Amino acid sequence: MRYLGSYTHRVAISNHRLVSLTDGQVTFRWRDSAQHNQKRLMTLPLEEFLRRFLLHLLPPGFVRIRNFGFLANRRRAALLPLCSQLLNAPAQSNPVPHPTPRTPPAPVFWTCPRCGGPMRVIERLTAAQIQLRSPPLPYACAA
């Protein structure tokens, strides 16, 4: 979660980490996690630097993740352990009864092919909306 979180709102490398560009060589700062996050410099040929940078760009049609709720940066450190604790907690012996909804739930027409559980329609998409949400076609991606 922490690894992916660094790529959801920012670019792969910020300008202040770039040190120099001379003779086709890019020098930048990085943190060596194996050495207790010690800051180091790395120099790469321009082509290799660009190759590594482009690995972090999203393909056309994909959007960045926006974390909120228990995954929000401000509250993640406090709430993720709480979520883990609650997920591992035994079931309550006297659960609190939930009020019954005024309208009956929508009838179930499908079952999940993986777990066999009931599936309900929560949203219907037009063909145009499906096209906007679909991943890019294989031939559209750069090799």
Image (cartoon, rainbow, N blue to C red):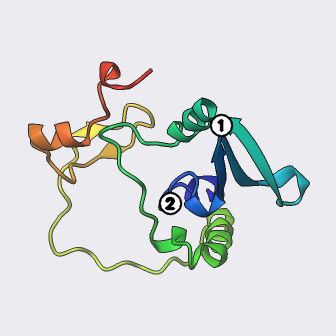
Q: What numbered label is drawn on residue 10?
A: 2
User: In the image, is residue 48 above or below residue 13?
Assistant: above
In the drawing, does residue 81 fall left or right of residue 114?
Answer: right
Percent x, y of residue 69: 46, 73
The residue sitting at 38% across, 31% down in the picture is: 113
Tell me the mark number nearer the camera, choosing from 2 and 1.
Answer: 1
In the picture as drawn, the residue positioned furthest to the right comes out as 35
Residue with the mark numbered 1: 23
Q: Can you give x and y, in whole percent of width and height, for residue 10 in the image? A: 50, 60
Is residue 95 positioned above or below 25 on the image?
A: below
Label 1 sits on a secondary structure element that is loop
Horizontal and vertical percent for residue 121?
21, 49
Q: Nearer the viewer, residue 14 or 96?
A: 14
Q: Amino acid at mark 2?
A: Arg
Q: Earlier in the sequence, mark 2 or mark 1?
A: 2
64 left or right of 83 in image: left
Circle 1 packing at 10 Å, graded few (<14), some (14-19), many (20+), is few
Q: Where is residue 119 drawn, in percent x and y?
A: 30, 45
Whole-number angstrom distance, CA of label 2 to CA of label 1? 28 Å
Direction from residue 108 to residue 20 in the image, left or right: right
Q: From the image, which quarter does the C terminus lie in?
A: top left
Q: Residue at x 47, y 62 (%)?
A: 9
The N terminus sits in image quarter: bottom right
Q: Residue at x 56, y 72 (%)?
A: 73
When asked about the image quadrant of residue 15, the answer is bottom right
Secondary structure category for the residue under label 2: loop
Identify which amino acid the numbered label 1 is placed on: Asp
- Residues tagged 2 and 1 counted as in contact (Cβ below 8 A): no
